[in-house]
Amino acid sequence: MKEFTLGRVIPLVEVSAADSAERGFHAPDVMTAELPLRDTHRRPLRDLRISVTDRCNFRCVYCMPKEVFGKDYVFLPRRELLSFEEIERVARVFVGLGVQKIRLTGGEPLLRRDLEYLVELLATLRTPRGEAVELTLTTNGSLLSRKAQSLRDAGLKRITVSLDSIDEAVFQRMNGVGFPAALVLEGIDAALRVGLAPVKVNMVVKRGVNEMQILPMARHFRGTGVEVRFIEFMDVGSSNGWNMESVLPSSEVVRAIDSEFPLVPSGREKPSDTSIRFHYADGQGKIGVISSVSQPFCGGCTRLRLSADGQLFTCLFASRGTDIRTPMRNGHTDEALRQLVVDLWMRRADRYSEQRGESSVTHDQSKVEMSFIGG
Ligand code: SAM
Ligand code: SF4
Ligand code: SF4
């Protein structure tokens, strides 16, 4: 495994065997004889990300640039969206097949009316071992100060809020609609107040755009219990004008923060985690880096995505999905839906990020947009 270099070398901490076993990466138990389901690279199916809408009130430059997602952009019509009952049914099938964690996302999930009802439905799901499913949500935070309490009451346990800068000018430019950072910060405070813990903050770092905000973000959230995760700008979708020069490798993020606040590496907490953690040496909390470009982590990828219109995607960089809505609306049984998922997962061979640099591998250029497939 590669290492981050900070002037001194910080080795990445390997995950212990006990941790792997706890995550169920070994021996299926009697309740789930054929589980965990494994793909062609022996990766289990553990995480389901559910996009509840392809719409968003932001136009982040790296996700839904306003030049592409303008007034004429055609979003999914309402009848195309899965109902909450349909989402719950699909989620139940997945949980029966080994999914332990569900993340609600989008587009902007808090734009979907009565989302709290879906949270209520999903909060009751239990794994075959009788454990509650880890339920979380990623939001741009714009409606969070109003919704934090009702989401908590509905059964949401924790939340991730995206915030790319605490500087107003930089943030308002990046979100494309001039939305104030101060209101997102209010949302984060509300989430902390109602006990949606831990609160995590996602910051996409784009070179030349907001890299000067790495230290201000670290300073702002250090010691607050909020973990900031610095994400490398990814080549998702086909419209964000991605190029390698705009990617600031996570090693540079770590080096910058370590120079002001010494960091101690703690690795991935679980093999399937997207982020590598570093603790502040003085005990003031931790940060994470998500290095999908400079240090791809396909080997531990246990994620499957369900789009708002009921398509299943086995990779964030896929061009095509598998329709589960049609069979569901045509009256297929749960067993038939289960079989569809089993077949899909067992065929899965995706490892896009690991192949990004390989000239021998060609990919379909029409990748689905992240706002559609769910971040
Ligand atoms: N609208 C919600 C939000 O922004 O949190 C949820 C959906 S958004 C697609 C999920 C996450 O994907 C956000 O944290 C966002 O910053 C991240 N994201 C979007 N486009 C990205 C890109 N090109 N590279 C890296 N992360 C990206
Ligand atoms: Fe909307 Fe989230 Fe994409 Fe920004 S990252 S445009 S908030 S979906
Ligand atoms: Fe998973 Fe695809 Fe991302 Fe690799 S590129 S980590 S397979 S979603």
Image (cartoon, helix red, strand yellow):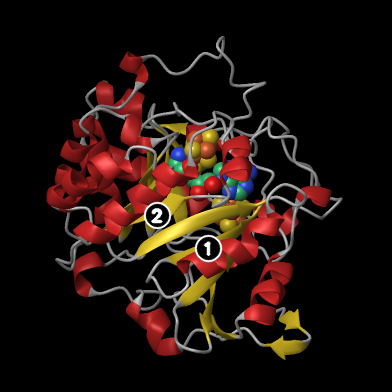
Write down the residue under mark 2: 160
What residue appears at the point 45 percent right and 62 percent down from the top-left corner?
38
Where residue 363 appears, as percent x and y from the top left, is: 74, 40
Q: Is mark 2 within 8 Å of ligand 1?
A: yes
On screen, residue 314 above or below 51 = below
Q: Earlier in the sequence, mark 1 or mark 2?
A: 2
Q: Nearer the viewer, residue 334 or 77?
A: 77
Q: Which mark is residue 123?
A: none
If the image is split into quadrants, where does the N terminus sit?
A: bottom right
Q: Is residue 375 visible?
A: no
How packed mark 2 is, by other alpha carbons closer than 10 Å (few <14, some 14-19, many 20 or more), is many
Q: Does residue 297 sit above or below 137 in this rendering?
A: below
The residue nearer to you, when weighing 115 against 340, is 115
Q: Secondary structure at mark 2?
A: strand
Q: Is residue 266 left or right of residue 122?
A: right
Residue 275: % across, % down: 53, 67
Residue 14 in view, yes or no: yes
Residue 91 vs residue 186: left or right?
Answer: left
- At x 33%, y 80%, the residue is 22
Residue positioned 16% across, 44% down in the render: 150
In contact (CB < 8 Å): disc 1 and disc 2: yes
| Three-letter amino acid code at the position of disc 1 | Arg
Q: Find residue 333 and report its horizontal and vertical position in percent.
A: 21, 34
**What is the residue that sits farthest to the right in this orientation?**
359
